[in-house]
Amino acid sequence: MALRSTDILTQTPQGLYCPLGDFHIDPVRPVKRALITHGHSDHARSGHRSVMATRETLRIMGVRYGEDFAGSTQEATLRESLQVGDVTVRFTPAGHVLGSAQVSIEAGGTRVVVSGDYKRAEDPTCMPYEVVPCDVFITEATFGLPVFRHPDTRGEVRKLLDSVALFPERAHIVGAYALGKAQRVMALLREEGYDQPIYLHGAMERLTELYKSEGIPLGETPKVVASERGKLAGAIVICPPSSIQDLWSRRFPDPVTCFASGWMRVRARARQKGVELPLVISDHSDWDDLCRTIRETGASEVWVTHGQEDALVHWCTTHGIKARPLHMLGYGDEGEAEEAAHPPLEGEGRERSERGGVETPPSESVGANHPTSALRADPPPQGEDEKGEVETP
Amino acid sequence: MNRFAALLDRLGYEPRRNAKLRLLVDYFRHTSDPDRGYALAAMTGALMFKEAKPGLIRGLVEERTDPELFRMSYHYVGDLAETVALIWPTPGHESVAPASDIPAIGHNNPPPHVPTLTEVIETLATTGKSDLPARVAGWMDALDETGRWALIKLITRELRVGVSARLAKTAVAQLGQIEPDEVELVWHGLEAPYEDLFAWVEGRGEKPESGNPAPFRPSMLSHPLEDEDFAKLEASEFLAEWKWDGIRLQAAAGHDSDGRPVRRIYSRTGEDVSRAFPDLVEALDFEGAIDGELLIVREGRVQTFNVLQQRLNRKAVTPKLIAEFPAHLRVYDILFEGEEDLRALHFAERRRRLEVLVSKLNDPRIDLSPMVPFKTWEDLAAARADPASVGAGPDADAIEGCMVKRANSPYLPGRPKGYWYKWKRDPYLVDAVMMYGQRGHGKRSSFYSDYTFGVWRDGPGGEELVPVGKAYHGFTDEELVKLDRYVRNHTVKRFGPVREVEYGKDKGLVLEVAFEGLQRSTRHKSGVAMRFPRINRIRWDKPAAEADRIETLEKILERGEQEVHPLKDQGAKRQGKRKEA
């Protein structure tokens, strides 16, 4: 007889937990054994006793937290089955960022797939998503509303290049998450034939080097020298989202503020951030792809971890698929829902869950000096994301 | 349609005028006729088709989407046009359809035809009400998200992308080496899609004839008069008149080729606003063009700007509105008399011609702005300080200073140097405490440059600060850097782009705020709204406890409220006030 899905996977304050294998997936607090789907700081945290992840994800964590980010590490080979405790575990590409993988857990004839964050759109910087048929599919819903339809990325990149051509005396400052989005934007620009140097904020540099060392061609990507900013008329500069509104970006010649994110689909969100050239480029699935993926897995049950859960649960239910929202705290697009990404304090998690869906709208991304950063159980990812952003006039 | 949609999309985010201009010029240069002409018509409000109601759009989307998903989406996006544009299910995107309606996968239908802007406009002009929904749905199926958004904006006539008619015409002028005013002069004789206009500015065709017997001529504008200017100006070479706190208008009248009278009223920027002032249009029984100020006059007395505002921006101009807010034109210049161009004459000479015209008109709705006699700048300063003492009488409250004009000045378009000056009365000043800082836009988007400030009042728990206004200019760039740092270093709370700063009896930053007037407002907690507030000085030295109290503003308000109220309820209101007092 098949096991019940909850025997294979349950929800704990640390995150999703597999009792039969005694491990957590993407835990938000230090645990004994963690399986990590990808390197974004809300999924990959430091301080676990042992970590299993793809080789690329382990490298990314090493760059972000230092080589001693976990007691021990184990590399997971894609598509290879591994016995962990009483379950069989397998990592499969998720198409989200370099190294991202879904984790499938099988025991007693039941298969549960934890997709982490994923997308179906083409991305030259990572392996494409592979559908894993399963009984229970655990999905995110960052863009889980039917208004989120991501357009073809080529059109968005053309918009940027057209603007560069029309305003050659201005610098185009593109806000993009340091891991994944930044490198994808660079790769897309190269695909469209842009061969000028693409300038990088300091916070982008090491992860971009890592991508290049993995054999992803990104062309010439010099770091911006503070004193040279005034000379970068006509250049494209990529920086963390928090820097597009920072004084850092104002030293460039008459900067055009751009932001590459799925949130840019909604005008009011773009305006709130003061964006002048929104680029709808997302590393998450849009509504159609969320629905399509759920169908293709053939799952009879869906759990929705975080994001706009209600609409997706509604869709599943009306299409005869059992679904429930997990209202998980601590996850959100890196930087975008940083407040939501803080690990819940004792008691807080339960309280909020009972209240029902904690919305994680794209809040203002915040630097290390944000008042609530004191609430973090873990130190924020040092250096890479925050360094160099805090600048006073 | 896609190029037009991309243009609107980009314009909607662009705060800078010059960048907007560049985007427009680029669009006009790379878009062919007649599409670009219809785009120009859309942006100048010259399109003639009956707008679609939001209800039509809503009805269409409700047929096609799961109501619960639509409700959640609308709640999240907050804008109907945008929600519909984004959620619209197109082939391949059926996951928003009600569950029972999922079509079989795969079909052999040809891809839908993406309409051009011209097709959309021409179809709208000829399609009857009953066919409209099907037409719109067909276009929606063919367009992408941005295209659908632009289509809805276009057909509901809610473009709102921050482009004035003047800016669009300036962009057309820049296609060639033509002054925007030249486009303005021929504009009113032209019709969409303006192929003759584009041919002319691109040097491919003759200049179009202005078929408008009552065209707009660009207005002459003034410079502010600064204290140091007086030493350089000789008082005897100037004439002065009151500066009225109204709306600048140009009234033009003539006859068309059939001899029928054509009468038009234009705003300072050349927008035809005749429809808003039928009572004034009726009074334009002359030939030529005159320049003056729109005021509301009740019982022979000019009302304050607050009263005038209640007449503006109304969609329906009802007889009741006209009776309660009778429009009046107080004139101070004449540009044309009949076919005769008077603009090269001296101001003093034009004034004599104007006086004759106004006396011949003999209409109470149009009168002359009186001259202010003076010999020395000291005389004029005294008049400006107390207009009632030099004959302004009960109209003194509607006077916001003096206009000082060189007696020999011609009437020149734009803001030429050295001819006309405005010498505004001193603003009101109040010391207020900074409460919130908000990030600015464009060049200031990294700076906390918009400040909300408050004054003291008695609250339930003792004295408290109540916000009375928000200002985002008046300071220098150096001061901005300091204010920005102050906000960052004294933040107590954040709300998106807004930061609340420290304030209280013993902490907080005092801002000396200058403003032009006050108005009662139900939208503001304090019940008052300021006109043109700006930061006059930063009082780093002043303790917050010594900032002003709300009573200071109440006094100013009471002075401005000694206006004549609309005829009907005049007695009742006045009595009510006395009783309260």
Image: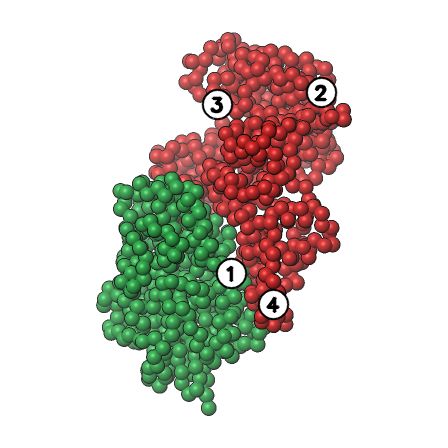
Distance between mark 4 and mark 3 Cα atoms: 69 Å
Query: Viewer-nearest of labels 1 and 3?
Result: 1
The chain letter under disc 3 is: B
Numbered badge on residue B286: 2
Q: Amino acid at mark 2?
A: Phe
> Could one spot residue B468 in this view of the protein?
no
The chain letter under disc 2 is: B
Which SS class for mark 3? strand
Task: Label the green chain with its letter.
Answer: A
Numbered badge on residue A136: none
Identify the residue under disc 4: B108
Query: Viewer-nearest of labels 4 and 3?
Result: 4
Numbered badge on residue A149: 1
The chain letter under disc 1 is: A
* Percent of width and height locating residue B442: 43, 41
Pointers 1 and 3 within a single chain: no
Task: Please indicate whether residue A126 sits to the left or right of residue B344 in the image.
Answer: left
Distance between mark 2 and mark 4 Cα atoms: 67 Å
Q: Residue at x 56, y 66 (%)?
A: B92
Pointers 2 and 4 within a single chain: yes
Which SS class for mark 1? loop
Query: Viewer-nearest of labels 2 and 4?
Result: 4
Query: In which image quadrant can residue A95 be found?
Result: bottom left
The tag earlier along the polypeptide, 2 or 4, is 4
Instruction: Find out whether the residues at labels 2 and 3 contact each other: C-beta distance under 8 Å.
Output: no
Query: In which image quadrant can residue B316 be found?
Result: top right
Q: Residue at x 73, y 37 (%)?
A: B318
